Image (spheres, rainbow, N blue to C red):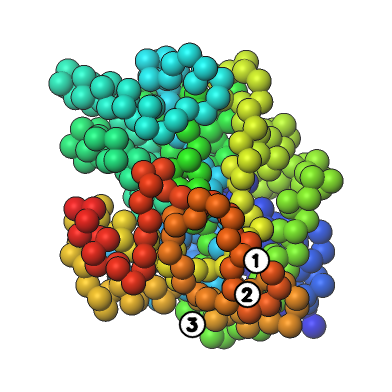
């Protein structure tokens, strides 16, 4: 018997795993048929999920946590048993701002976050003094894009709420907003940075993987009651998406997967732009050559899809920091429970796929490869550092939050 699941998504390359699970027959192998609802904003994706118009969604990880905690709307228990990918976003500046902030070889390669941040600080303070503060676009207030941008700005001495303005711009309208001069820069996922570059509306300055090398991004999210009702189907979907991930990262499959993802019903973008994203190549400025940045997108290796509880706790720390909240141990526990490694383990137990031995780890602690304890398979974790050299120990969550205020 085939079970049908409806999945909401935004036209982004990192929606790839459920899409490719359906397109390549991995879902069918698991007794599933997947249908998709393409939206233009994260608010709409979330509404469809909460009101039962979709079974699961490609969703911003912080938004799943914020929704479960009742931030900005009544609390609804959401769960995330699968991380759809790490990294994959970039910071793109208007050509005018880029010409003042990026120097020399930075026009043709990704800059150093400290150097770019230092020059951006000078521009931000000058613009603020002139009464025209720089404005940055992010895809949603409760997004890793917002938190990565703020984390970087704050470390470089720019007050995200005092020295610049940050506004919400839905990903498909990023290039239009840059072109119209409504924003001076943006943090967004592919293909929208590259579309801005191709249109001459922006220049890519940094990848968010330079801010946090293994930063958590989108998750497969669903209502907790839907997980309870459809647990076997959700576990089948996890297995199908793991197979899709192995297919996605194989260079032999890049062309075919780019053709699928670029189609109108999915990303609705040029094949070349999607191909560059999935092969870790970026054209940084209009007319420039493709620049290779390994692990720009990270969808499969090193247990990339495992929902580490420590990732959820780091995102909670940023919610507290930027939403002017106080640390609350009960709230922190609720945030941690959104990520469901138990479901992920149950789905993959006995398959031979890699399963970590722990469900939490110190984030940002690795500068060299480390063989991790595994419940199943063999796992080597690579560099996962934050650009400022800090690390996040989930056992010291409250102290970490206080240290950032």
Q: CA distance from mark 3 to mark 2?
A: 30 Å
Q: Position of residue 94 (x, y in %)?
A: 42, 22
Query: Is tag 3's residue or tag 2's residue first in the polypeptide sequence?
Result: 3
Q: Nearer the viewer, residue 112 or 44?
A: 112
Q: Nearer the viewer, mark 3 or mark 2?
A: 2
Q: Position of residue 132 (x, y in %)?
A: 22, 22
Quarter of the rendering occupied by the N terminus? bottom right
Q: Residues within 10 Å of mark 2 (few under 14, many from 20)?
A: some
Q: What residue did someone put label 3 on?
A: 225
Q: CA distance from mark 1 to mark 2?
A: 6 Å
Q: Residue at x 38, y 47 (%)?
A: 389
Marking on residue 16: none
Q: What residue did someone put label 2 on?
A: 374
Q: Nearer the viewer, mark 1 or mark 3?
A: 1
Q: Position of residue 219 (x, y in %)?
A: 53, 62
Q: Residues within 10 Å of mark 3 (few under 14, many from 20)?
A: few
Q: What residue did someone put label 1 on?
A: 379
Q: Residue at x 58, y 61 (%)?
A: 370
**In the rendered image, is residue 72 in sight?**
no
């Amino acid at each position: 018997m085939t079970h049908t699941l409806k999945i909401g998504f935004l036209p982004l390359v990192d929606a790839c795993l459920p899409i490719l699970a359906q397109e390549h027959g991995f879902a069918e192998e698991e007794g599933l048929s997947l249908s998709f609802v393409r939206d233009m904003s994260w608010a709409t994706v979330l509404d469809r999920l909460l009101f039962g118009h979709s079974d699961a969604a490609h969703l911003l990880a912080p938004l799943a946590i914020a929704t479960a905690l009742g931030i900005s709307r009544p609390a609804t228990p959401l769960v995330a048993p699968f991380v759809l990918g790490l990294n994959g976003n970039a910071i793109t500046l208007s050509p005018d701002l880029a010409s003042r902030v990026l120097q020399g070889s930075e026009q043709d390669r990704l800059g150093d976050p400290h150097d770019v941040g230092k020059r951006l600080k000078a521009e931000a303070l000058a613009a603020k003094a002139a009464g025209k503060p720089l404005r940055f676009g992010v895809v949603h207030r409760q997004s890793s894009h917002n938190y990565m941008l703020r984390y970087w700005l704050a470390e470089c001495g720019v007050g995200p709420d005092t020295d610049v303005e940050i506004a919400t711009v839905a990903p498909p309208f990023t290039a239009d907003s840059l072109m119209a001069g409504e924003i001076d820069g943006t943090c967004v996922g592919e293909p929208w940075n590259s579309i801005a570059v191709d249109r001459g509306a922006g220049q890519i300055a940094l990848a968010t993987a330079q801010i946090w090398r293994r930063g958590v991004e989108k998750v497969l999210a669903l209502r907790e009651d839907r997980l309870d009702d459809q647990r076997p189907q959700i576990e089948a979907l996890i297995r199908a998406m793991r197979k899709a991930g192995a297919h996605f990262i194989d260079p032999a499959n890049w062309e075919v997967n780019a053709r699928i993802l670029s189609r109108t019903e999915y990303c609705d973008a040029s094949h070349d732009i999607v191909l560059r994203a999935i092969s870790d190549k970026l054209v940084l400025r209009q007319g420039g050559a493709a620049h290779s940045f390994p692990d720009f997108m990270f969808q499969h290796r090193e247990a990339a899809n495992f929902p580490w509880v420590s990732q959820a706790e780091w995102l909670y720390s940023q919610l507290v920091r930027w939403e002017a909240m106080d640390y609350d141990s009960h709230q922190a526990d609720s945030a941690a429970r959104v990520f469901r490694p138990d479901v992920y383990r149950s789905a993959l137990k006995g398959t031979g796929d890699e399963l970590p031995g722990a469900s939490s780890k110190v984030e940002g602690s690795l500068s060299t490869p480390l063989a991790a304890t595994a419940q199943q398979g063999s796992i080597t974790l690579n560099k996962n550092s934050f650009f400022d050299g800090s690390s996040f120990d989930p056992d010291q969550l409250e102290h970490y939050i206080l240290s950032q205020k």
